[in-house]
Structure formats: C-alpha cells, structure tokens
Amino acid sequence: MMGIQNSSVGRRRYLRGAGALTTMALLGNTAEASERDHRGHRHQSRGDDQHHHHGRRPDKRIVGYYPSWAGDYTPHDVPYHKLTHLNYAFLETEANGEVKLAVTGDSAPEVLAEFEAITHERQHTSFMLSIADFGSNMSAVAASADARERFARTAVEQLRRYNFDGIDIDWEYPDGSVREDDPENFTLLLEELRSKLDGAGAADGRYYELSMAAAPIPSNIDPLEVEKIADYLDFVNVMNYNFYGSWSSATNFNAPLYAPYEDPTYWQQLLTVDNAMRYWADQPISRDKLVLGTPFYGFAFENVENENRGLFQPFDGADTKSYDDIRRLKTEPHYQYHWHHEARVPWLYSEADDVFVTYDDRHSVMEKSRYVRDNDFGGMMCWELSHDPSNTLISSIHAVLGCSHRP
C-alpha cells in the first residue's frame, strides 16, 4: 500500500491513463458482474477455523496501514482497540529474494522496535508486515524457485523477529505486465509463503495470517489465479481509490461508492467502489475474505472554473492532500462543502481559489462501512493511518463495524 514519503498523501497511480483497455474491460465485465454470495464455496477463511493467539476474531476486519515515515504520528498514537489488523508498511524485496527493511536511512528499525513492544500489550490486534515491490524485483523473484524459498524464509524470519502475526503482499501488479507468467508465479510465491508460515506456526504454537493488496479493476484482476490463491490467503485488501486524479481529463471523485448519475461519460460511471467489490465478489473467493479499502487522503484540483461547483470540469494540475490537510482547508470560509447523494462522497470547492477537492470524510467512510456490513464483505481497510492523526475516520469505521474486543 504505497505512499509518498515527501508529501502528505499516498502515491497510488495505477489508474493513470486508464484509457481504452480499462474502459473495455469495465464495459465488458463489470456491468455484468454477478452479486452472488460465495459463502458456499469450498474456500474457508483460515482465521475463522484456527486458533489465533490474539483471541476471538471480530465479525469484520478493520485494517489500518501504518507507514515507517509516519513522522509525528507514532505507534503509540494508533487506536488499537478500533483495529483488528495493523499493517506495517513496508519491507522490500532484494533481487535475490531476501526480504529486508525499507528504506535506507529510514526510521524503520526504531518504529518496528516500538511495535514489537506493543504486540505484547495489544493482544487483540493482529500485526502484519507488508512487503512491497519498491525495487521492481517481485517478478524475477517469483519466477525462481530458489528466490521464492529465500523470500518466504526471510519474510518469516522478520515476522518472528518483531513478534508479528502475519505477512501482507503489496505487489503492483502480478498481472503479466512484466512477465507473461507473473500470475502463475505469484500463485507459487504465495504457496511457498503459506507453507513457511504454517511451518513456523506449528513450531510456535500460533497461526500466522497471509493477505494481499489487490487492484480494483478487471484488467488487473482477470489474470490472477483467484481460486488457487484464495486457498493461501486469509483476506484481500481491495484498493478502492485513485479512480481519478491528476492523470484524469476532468475533475471527479477519488473513491466514489456509486456512480454519479450526471457523469458525462458512461464508461466512467463504472469506476466505483461498488463495481470493484462486485467484480471481486464474482471471483471464486469468499466474500468474507474481501476487505474494502478506502483512502484517508484526497486530491486538490487547480484552476477549476465555477461550473457545477467544480465537478466534471477541466483543470491544470492536482496535488495530493491528507485528510488532516483537508480538514484544515474546510475551515477556510471560501471553501464550500458539498455532498453527492448518488456517489455518497463529499467534495470542497473554492471559487476564490478555483480549487476542487475530492476526499473521504466520516460520513462517506461510514457509508462504505455500512455497505460492507450489508453486503457480507470481510471488512474495511484504510491507506493510511497517519493521514488522519485525529483518528476521526478510523473511529467512524469502528462505529459501524465495531470490534468484539475492548481496549
């Protein structure tokens, strides 16, 4: 779940130039995606059936990513009683498959040492190490049996070193765009990792979880061997954000739950959280393994004329802003708050500054949380916690989904 270290917002850019390929994939597939429930499928959530050392699992997951560059938002600022999972971001993969701390000169060792101490205190929160593909080595590593073994072995070594409870894989994306056989090799990588985790778990008397961060669009989903990887994964964090941004032709919403009815282009109406989750739900994987990801950041589009309160208008650039930045911006008198009743997300517009701001607030994350609850999905995920040091948004998610444990 990548983020920009030198700005206040994450750096997801996988929908840049979505273009004709994504358009056709969405038109041809998403509009017809079935809403059938896969609870009858043979795949069961491993975490539901096996003892976990942190106690009884809540009905829904609440997953928060914490980056090593979180700055003043320290591990002790995290509201653990409102999370089921804390995902530390990131570890990285060397060319030979070795998993190491990222990034050189970063505060990762000190931060992880703090988390290691906290793992002994917060027995009802699962702590996950998220491994990213910073060096673009994942494809080569997954293609080699020796490198896959080294990857899995060293990932488990890091896990045990810091007393964490699982591994999260953030490879963007194993869709065949680097090597044609990336999807098949990704399956083999997860198989090796699951085997190493189970071996360590048997020796340690505990269960180690495995998750992945996943794309929300069909062109990245279709190549995956979902039925196979579902056997190895405890859950999938679907990254439902960056549907629109600086790469887009007009202002729009970062992460709309549903399509704005007045969107001028029909195919763009398919770039929504609802369509992404329904598409994933039509894959051979249990709905309760699918976790809806939401952004704790937004985009500020510049030089936007005052037509339609800035929505669906041309612009001359966009900056990323954390929820904390946007909260402060909202207090300025010339920034007007608007709520889209179809998309179920807010935006700000300033005629004085010609700025349109798309983001999620407590109302929209509660809408998405209710959507998860009402559609039997597995929970909510956020990228990322330090974007909201007030913990307003994670508290709003918790207010809907709750947790079965107490602080």
Image (spheres, rainbow, N blue to C red):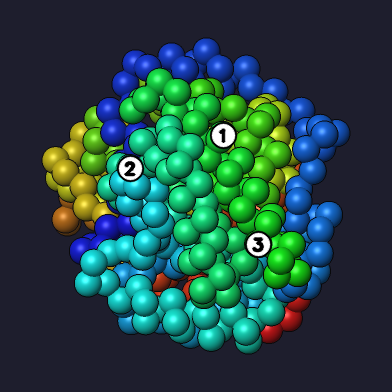
Question: Callout 3: helix, strand or loop?
Answer: helix
In the image, 177 versus 93, the foreground residue is: 93
Q: Mark 1 or mark 3: name the one nearer the start of the chain.
A: 1
Residue 23 position (above or below residue 304): above
Mark 2 is surrounded, within 10 Å at the Cα level, by few (under 14), some (14 to 19) or many (20 or more) other residues, namely some
Residue shown at the point (53%, 23%) measured from the top left: 222
Decide: marks 2, 3 in contact (CB < 8 A)? no
Q: CA distance from mark 2 to mark 3?
A: 25 Å
What kind of residue is marked 1? Answer: Thr
- Asked whether 228 or 146 is in front, the reply is 146
Report x, y in % for residue 357.
31, 52
Residue 182 spot, x, y in % from top left? 44, 28
Q: Secondary structure at mark 2?
A: loop
Q: Quadrant of the C terminus?
A: bottom right
Identify the residue at horizontal 49%, vertical 31% (top origin). Answer: 185
Q: Nearer the viewer, residue 235 or 218?
A: 235
Q: Does residue 298 show up?
A: no
The residue that label 3 is drawn on is 200
Report x, y in % for residue 308.
32, 38
What label does residue 187 carry, if any?
1
Q: Closer to the camera: disc 1 or disc 3?
A: 3
